Amino acid sequence: MEKKLWEEIARPNQLEPHGDWNIWMILAGRGFGKTRSAAETIRKWAVNNRYRRIALVSNTIQEARQVMVEGESGLLSISDPKEKLEFLPSRRLLKWPNGAIATLYGAEHYEHLRGPQFDAAWIDEFAKFQHPRETFEQLSFSLRLGSNPKAILTTTPRPIQFIKDLIARDDVVTARGTSLENVENLSPTFLRQLEYLRGTRLESQEIYAEIIDEKQNTLWSWSDIEKCCQAPPHFLDNVVIGVDPALTSGNESDETGIVVVGMDGFGKGYVLDDLSISSTPEIWGKIVVEAYRKYSARLVVVETNAGGELLPHLLRSIDGSIRLKTIHANTSKIARAEPIAILYQKKMIFHARQFHKLEMQMATYEPKSKSPDRLDAMVWAMTELFDISKNSGMPAIFVV
């Protein structure tokens, strides 16, 4: 069967963009097809005599060879044998019969780009480079042949400032995409592995190609959060549920934070579940009561700033035996969260599994951010669990 042309099988965001641009940045998740997109474009440029002196830049020379040249989607694999593309490993060189050549470089020795001249370049997995800005700038000085030099940059995103700088440039066209766009070409094993990333920062970054910032004014760092995943003991007899009700009710309201926490016999706390939901009080009230029964909780802690005495009344109307404490917040969210953040740093609090939305709020909440419902619910529950309100400046908790 005759091999289909790349233009016939590629998705629109895998094809060379139209318009006036100098850099095409493909910012996409693992398995999206970044390598294939770049390799097919470089091949077309070379075969059609559009560009004749091409730089192939990866993190190392070895990675350039293994991925960009000899990989499953590398230049040798996607080229028609009739094109007689030749690879000379000792010279780090690819040669087409028409005289076009591509030379391999490793970003670890980006100074080697000083001197050579190119009319095109492909930079792969740019976010891995130890010196991304320096490597890119040195390559830019080398792109001085021809009337319209171009570069293709393929990478899975990371919170690198220079990537953000490139996105903002007028001469950069950014194509975004997720791993899930290419499901039909991914192995079942890879797809099963994605399940283990569900709800994590890595899922956002590596699969959905989101740039997850490390903010400076937050109480939790991503590194601390990613280290706190640890299964709790099989049985915990000290379980508390924190509830941070939305200011408005209804299916379109803000979320009501509902977080279940527990403590083991060694005094370590665990986030056991995040049941937060955007719904009416009747619906989230039933969820709270069901969690109370499921986890054999000893207490539900409810912030009453939004609903006063109506909230305890609502929960007791569903289950009259539920034990409640109400809280009226009179300090800032940051001040309330500080003692809990310290417990995380001391490795006194863990997550039974990865809770993507809660952890995003932990790592990104700043004083002027939108109210963090899940984070608030977790803080109230942990404050009760560790009994730290009297000694930490936390608001008093009143039994109702």
Image (cartoon, helix red, strand yellow):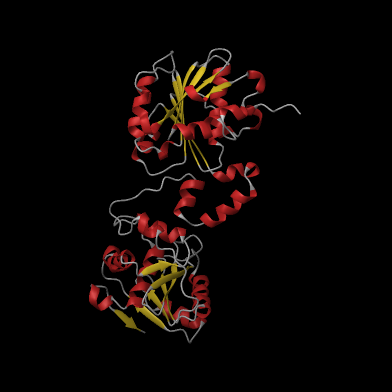
Q: Residue at x 39, y 75 (%)?
A: 302
- In the picture, which quadrant includes the C terminus? bottom left
Q: Residue at x 47, y 75 (%)?
A: 233
Percent coordinates x, y for residue 230 in the rendering: 44, 66
- Res. 22 image quadrant: top left
Percent coordinates x, y for residue 134 in the rendering: 32, 31
Looking at the image, residue 344 sits to the left or right of residue 238; the answer is: left
Q: Residue at x 47, y 61 (%)?
A: 354
Regarding residue 261, the answer to whether it shows in the image is: yes
Q: Nearer the viewer, residue 110 or 160?
A: 110
- In the picture, which quadrant includes the N terminus? top right
Figure label count: 0
Regarding residue 20, the answer to whether it shows in the image is: no
Image position of 12 with respect to 83: above or below: below
Percent coordinates x, y for residue 279 in the rendering: 50, 65
Q: Residue at x 47, y 50 (%)?
A: 204
Looking at the image, residue 280 sits to the left or right of residue 387; the answer is: right
Residue lying at the far right in this picture: please name it. Answer: 1
Image position of 28 with respect to 227: above or below: above
